[in-house]
Image (cartoon, rainbow, N blue to C red):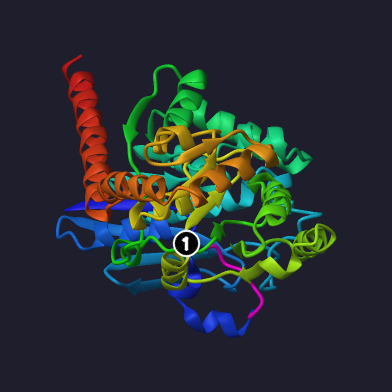
């Protein structure tokens, strides 16, 4: 039996739903790709899975057994309060996550795993993983060095420096695209890299997109500037001049001030009646919107492997996305998606107009993307990738230990 400890963000409301009553307005990232892979690993009879995560919603450490997984929820945020540190004074980031890392490392030491798997370099998890003293696999998610270029801030630069330390120190990495693979190699030429894709929720595999004679667009993602929502609204204004019946649904949430800014921008562009802000929705509702839409649009300025794009591939919803980051590793232009330049509303509008006017092209892209997506993002295949990585890392450690004994 292999004992695996994950250090990862996790939707604690799926573990302790009663916490929602204490902070009903608290947004919790679903991290669905992490949950899908976790459930796949937990279903095996040769893995004992522990997930160590942080949340401001608990008052102290909580351990829960659920769905075949041991969850260890550690308190983060403001002490004695169920609140995260405010964005204007993120004490955890300003202290380089010193307190977070100490608690995470101590909990891992108590678990005594065979291997640690840290998810993401955007918070304390990978920093704790490389400091834990156990064999550690770091899964790359967003690349902070790239995000800082389009969304610079003092706090993001701190996390970027921590990311560089983590990547230069760790030995084993889980990557998804040429983009994160190249980033790791640029810092750590001796790193051993394993391909570990995202595991998409089953509800998308149960959904098949269908061609329809509607001009309906769908965006799914965080409503923040780097996701290119402003560019999408500008493209909508261009398209509205030629097609009065075009519709756009925006699924996702963001800072209230920025969402208000987007609403005001839509009003100023004269498109408020054809843009619907739907807020955060569960996976099942988003899958339904895939069937009701004709194009998935992702005009992001930087992304490694956006989960929403993988979901669209699985259902076969035709895709228009920016040619940035890891996206060209996930799709091929004019085969599985239509790629456009970033920050270019005219190019985006032209691409949307082309696909809406060519149902045959949409159908072909749908078939191609579905075939690729249902192989690459199937949970069973991703579980196999993760297990192969774990075994190779542990075997390498055993060989090194045997060589030390022989010397």
Res. 133 visible in picture: no
Of the pair 183 and 353, the residue shown nearer to us: 353
Is 193 a magenta residue? no
Image quadrant for the C terminus?
top left
Of the pair 338 and 84, the residue shown nearer to us: 338
In this view, the residue farthest toward the top is 407
Q: Is residue 64 above or below residue 162?
A: below
Res. 394 visible in picture: yes
x then y, percent, for residue 377: 31, 49
x then y, percent, for residue 277: 66, 68
Q: Is residue 104 left or right of residue 311?
A: right
Q: Residue at x 29, y 61 (%)?
A: 205
x then y, percent, for residue 29: 54, 62
Total marks in image: 1
Q: Which residues are magenta?
A: 24-29
Quarter location, residue 392: top left
Q: Which residue is mark 1?
A: 10
Q: Residue at x 64, y 48 (%)?
A: 227
| Secondary structure category for the residue under label 1 | loop
Q: Residue at x 43, y 60 (%)?
A: 32
x then y, percent, for residue 96: 66, 42
Quarter location, residue 379: bottom left
Quarter location, residue 165: top right
Q: Is residue 340 left or right of residue 170?
A: right
Dominant secondary-structure state across the stretch colored magenta: loop
Is 28 a magenta residue? yes
Q: Residues within 10 Å of mark 1 (few under 14, many from 20)?
A: many
Q: Residue at x 43, y 45 (%)?
A: 118
């Amino acid at each position: 039996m292999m004992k695996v400890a994950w250090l990862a963000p996790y939707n604690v409301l799926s573990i302790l739903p009663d916490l929602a009553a204490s902070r009903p307005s608290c947004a919790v990232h679903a991290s669905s790709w992490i949950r899908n892979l976790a459930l796949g690993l937990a279903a095996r009879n040769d893995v004992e899975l522990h997930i160590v995560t942080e949340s401001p919603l608990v008052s102290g450490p909580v351990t829960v057994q659920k769905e075949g997984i041991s969850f260890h929820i550690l308190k983060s945020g403001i002490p004695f309060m169920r609140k995260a540190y405010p964005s204007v004074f993120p004490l955890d980031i300003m202290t380089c996550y010193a307190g977070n890392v100490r608690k995470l490392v101590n909990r891992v030491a108590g678990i005594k795993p065979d291997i640690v798997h840290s998810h993401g370099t955007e918070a304390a998890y990978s920093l704790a993983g490389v400091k834990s003293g156990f064999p550690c696999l770091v899964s790359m998610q967003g690349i902070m060095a790239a995000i800082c270029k389009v969304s610079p801030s003092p706090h993001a630069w701190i996390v970027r420096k921590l990311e560089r330390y983590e990547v230069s120190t760790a030995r084993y990495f889980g990557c998804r695209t040429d983009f994160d693979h190249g980033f790791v190699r640029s810092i750590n030429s001796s790193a051993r890299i394993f391909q570990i894709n995202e595991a998409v929720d089953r509800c998308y595999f149960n959904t098949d997109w269908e061609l329809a004679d509607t001009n309906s667009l769908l965006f799914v993602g965080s409503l923040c500037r780097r996701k290119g929502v402003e560019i999408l609204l500008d493209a909508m204004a261009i398209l509205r001049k030629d097609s009065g019946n075009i519709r756009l649904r925006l699924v996702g949430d963001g800072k209230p001030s920025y969402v208000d800014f987007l609403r005001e921008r839509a009003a100023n562009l004269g498109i408020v009646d054809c843009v619907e802000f739907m807020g955060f929705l569960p996976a099942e509702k988003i899958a339904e919107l895939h069937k009701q839409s004709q194009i998935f649009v992702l005009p992001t300025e930087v992304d490694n492997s956006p989960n929403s794009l993988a979901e669209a591939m699985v259902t076969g919803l035709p895709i228009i996305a920016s040619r940035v980051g890891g996206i060209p590793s996930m799709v091929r232009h004019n085969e599985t998606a239509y790629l456009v330049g970033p920050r270019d509303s005219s190019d985006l509008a032209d691409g949307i107009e082309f696909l809406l006017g060519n149902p045959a092209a949409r159908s072909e892209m749908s078939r191609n993307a579905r075939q690729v997506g249902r192989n690459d993002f199937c949970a069973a295949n991703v579980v196999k990738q993760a297990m192969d990585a774990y075994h190779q890392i542990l075997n390498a450690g055993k060989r090194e230990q045997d060589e030390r004994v022989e010397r």
